[in-house]
Amino acid sequence: SQKIEQNSEALNIQEGKTATLTCNYTNYSPAYLQWYRQDPGRGPVFLLLIRENEKEKRKERLKVTFDTTLKQSLFHITASQPADSATYLCALEKGSGNTPLVFGKGTRLSVIA
Amino acid sequence: EAGVTQFPSHSVIEKGQTVTLRCDPISGHDNLYWYRRVMGKEIKFLLHFVKESKQDESGMPNNRFLAERTGGTYSTLKVQPAELEDSGVYFCASSPSGTDYGYTFGSGTRLTVV
């Protein structure tokens, strides 16, 4: 069956460092991969989308890579701040655009001042 | 622009009762999705509407769940009769047509069946 694993349930880092979160998937060939941020009591908030033919995408302090050979995506937050503390979710699209998402369980990031 | 609105934010009902959740997507978004997160598990897909039509309902758990989208605008998700295992947070999301768009989620409805 299709499976998405986000390797760490929780990750603690010092303010100013780069946080790296990992998303691995099996039995799946997604056309799109998305990353979301979720705060307690709130819905997921879209951060970045990367296509299967893109290796890397950046947005401000965020960077996402997508390796379809390794079946892995890495999500980086540079110069991390306490305000970046949240749960980060990896999600794959079942098809190509406007199709349901398959989510990982998420990684809870804590940035310590 | 207004985001995706869900209500109620919380609902506590007894087993066997009926509950209706509502979602108002972003105006103009043709795609509307329902997802659910059961405690300790990942968010799971339930249903996808394109305008008023059900595009994919492969995630609906059973026939106690009924979703509708009136005139391609707001959507309702009815659970009748509710069971204990239906407890969780129900999220609605919407997106415009086309690719390269992330989905906008509502804050969710926390449903507790006792």
Image: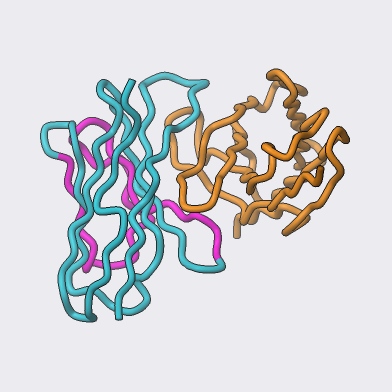
Chain that appears orange: A
Residue drawn at x 33%, y 79% as measured from the top left: B84
Q: In the rendered view, does B50 fall on the left or right side of A69?
A: left
Chain that appears cyan: B
Residue drawn at x 32%, y 31% as measured from the top left: B31
Magenta-tinted stretch: B41-69
**Corner quadrant of residue A37:** top right
**Corner quadrant of residue B96:** top left
Q: How many marks?
A: 0
Residue drawn at x 36%, y 55% as measured from the top left: B90
Q: Is residue B57 magenta?
A: yes
Q: Which residue sits furthest front? A: A113
Q: In the rendered view, does A25 fall on the left or right side of B37?
A: right
Question: A100 above or below B15?
Answer: above
In percent of width and height, residue B72 lies at 17, 31
The quadrant the C terminus of chain A occupies is top right
- Asked whether A40 or A104 is in front, the reply is A40
In percent of width and height, residue A29 lies at 64, 40
Task: State the scheme by which the image is colored.
Answer: by chain
In percent of width and height, residue A9 lies at 72, 59
Q: In the rendered view, does B34 fall on the left or right side of B103?
A: left
Residue drawn at x 62%, y 52% as measured from the top left: A104
Q: Is residue A26 visible?
A: no
Q: Is residue A29 magenta?
A: no
Question: A2 above or below B26?
Answer: below
The quadrant the N terminus of chain A occupies is bottom right
Q: In the rendered view, does B73 fall on the left or right side of B106?
A: left
Q: Is residue A36 visible?
A: yes
